[in-house]
């Protein structure tokens, strides 16, 4: 009996320090690891977002893990998340390839004590503690329709070239584009949204989808691409086909990839936020979630290094979010200042 009690005490004493460390999210080797999972590889926007995340995690003395599947699907992200659960990371921040499909695996991660957040493209509220949103989704959607109206001179066919059909960030922006059109029927009377095409954030597919739009709609005036991959592909096609001045491209683009098309007139202007800052802000939200400073509830706030302090607010989908700030407009007057920044 006495021996059993002693053995038990020995076991408890051996396990206690490990348990204490785990409680703060560290692995067996004492290192706290924070993972970021992007939509897919080969997207310069995603690389910048992950770069910002890695900077923010390292600045706080932890270790970042950056992952992205080859293809932008939920299934491919599920495999990565399963590996991260086995690795016992402290947090997973994900740019979701699907709003709902990741819920079972992310719930499993959360049940193991891993803190889960989304950034850029949200997963549903049941799957996340909070979402790091680059900018107000309503403002993005409405602004892009207003830009298309302006470029089309008020009338003509317009089309949207999106990422994947399941991408929750693009789908939300497109919903707001439709709302903007519906809210002002008189203003947009002569503006026809003829199609939403999906380039899947793959360069070649985005190029061929742009070509398909040009072929199907000879009177097309504006292509709105709310994706950095799509807008660059559309800019390329319009330029190569000698359609500058006939078809305009706008949407969300990286200044580094779009400078050529902003200067040559294929894209009169476009919008974006700083993707490095989205990642950096996510890094601080993730560590704050791990050390218990935030639970993800509206009204909580946390400090995000060089970006200052942020508050968690209610999101339109019933969950919560953190807003980085307003999107920025890039045009011929300022593009040279920005093209080497991101
Ligand atoms: C693409 C991705 C990303 C989106 C940007 C605007 O790079 O789809 O998720 O935020 O475009």
Image (tube, rainbow, N blue to C red):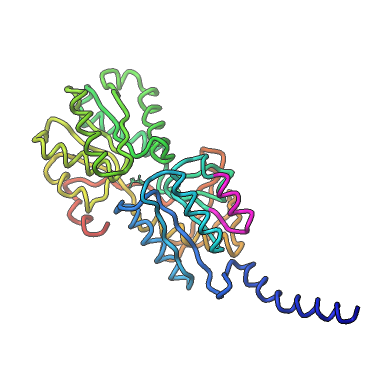
Q: Is residue 334 magenta?
A: no
> Furthest residue to the left?
242
Residue at x 75% of width, y 76% of height: 11
Residue 170, percent across and down? 38, 38
- Image quarter (top left, top right, bottom left or bottom right) of the C terminus: bottom left
Q: On screen, 213 above or below 292?
A: above
- Write down the region rendered in magenta: 103-116
Residue at x 35% of width, y 58% of height: 276
Residue 297, percent across and down? 60, 50
Instruction: Return the residue nearer the eye: 293 or 86.
Output: 86
> Furthest residue to the right?
1
Instruction: Return the residue nearer the eye: 40 or 161.
Output: 40
- Image quarter (top left, top right, bottom left or bottom right) of the N terminus: bottom right
Q: Is residue 322 left or right of residue 294?
A: left
Question: What count of labels does the image hold?
Answer: 0
Magenta: main secondary structure equals: helix
């Amino acid at each position: 009996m006495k021996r059993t009690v002693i053995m038990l005490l020995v076991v408890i004493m051996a396990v206690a320090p490990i348990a204490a460390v785990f409680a703060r999210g560290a692995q067996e080797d004492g290192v706290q690891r924070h993972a970021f999972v992007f939509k897919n590889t080969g997207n310069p926007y995603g690389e910048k977002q992950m770069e910002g995340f890695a900077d923010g995690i390292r600045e706080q003395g932890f270790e970042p893990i950056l992952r992205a599947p080859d293809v932008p699907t939920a299934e491919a992200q599920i495999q990565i998340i399963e590996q991260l659960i086995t690795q016992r990371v402290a947090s997973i921040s994900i740019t979701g390839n699907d709003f709902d499909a990741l819920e079972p695996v992310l719930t499993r991660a959360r049940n193991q004590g891993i803190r889960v957040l989304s950034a850029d493209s949200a997963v549903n509220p049941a799957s996340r503690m909070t979402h790091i949103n680059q900018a107000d989704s309503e403002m993005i959607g409405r602004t892009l329709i207003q830009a298309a109206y302006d470029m089309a001179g008020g009338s003509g066919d317009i089309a949207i070239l999106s990422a994947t059909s399941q991408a929750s960030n693009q789908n939300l922006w497109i919903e707001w584009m439709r709302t903007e059109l519906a809210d002002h029927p008189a203003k947009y009377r002569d503006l026809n949204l003829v199609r939403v095409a999906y380039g899947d954030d793959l360069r070649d597919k985005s190029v061929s989808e742009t070509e398909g739009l040009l072929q199907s709609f000879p009177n097309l005036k504006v292509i709105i691409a709310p994706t950095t991959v799509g807008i660059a592909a559309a800019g390329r096609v319009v330029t190569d086909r000698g359609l500058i001045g006939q078809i305009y491209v706008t949407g969300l683009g990286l200044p580094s990839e779009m400078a050529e098309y902003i200067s040559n007139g294929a894209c009169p202007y476009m919008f974006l936020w700083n993707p490095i800052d989205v990642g950096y802000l996510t890094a601080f939200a993730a560590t704050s979630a791990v050390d218990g400073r935030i639970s993800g509830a509206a009204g909580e706030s946390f400090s995000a290094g060089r970006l200052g302090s942020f508050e968690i607010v209610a999101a339109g989908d019933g969950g919560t979010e953190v807003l980085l700030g307003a999107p920025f407009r890039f045009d011929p007057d300022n593009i040279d200042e920005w093209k080497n920044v991101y």
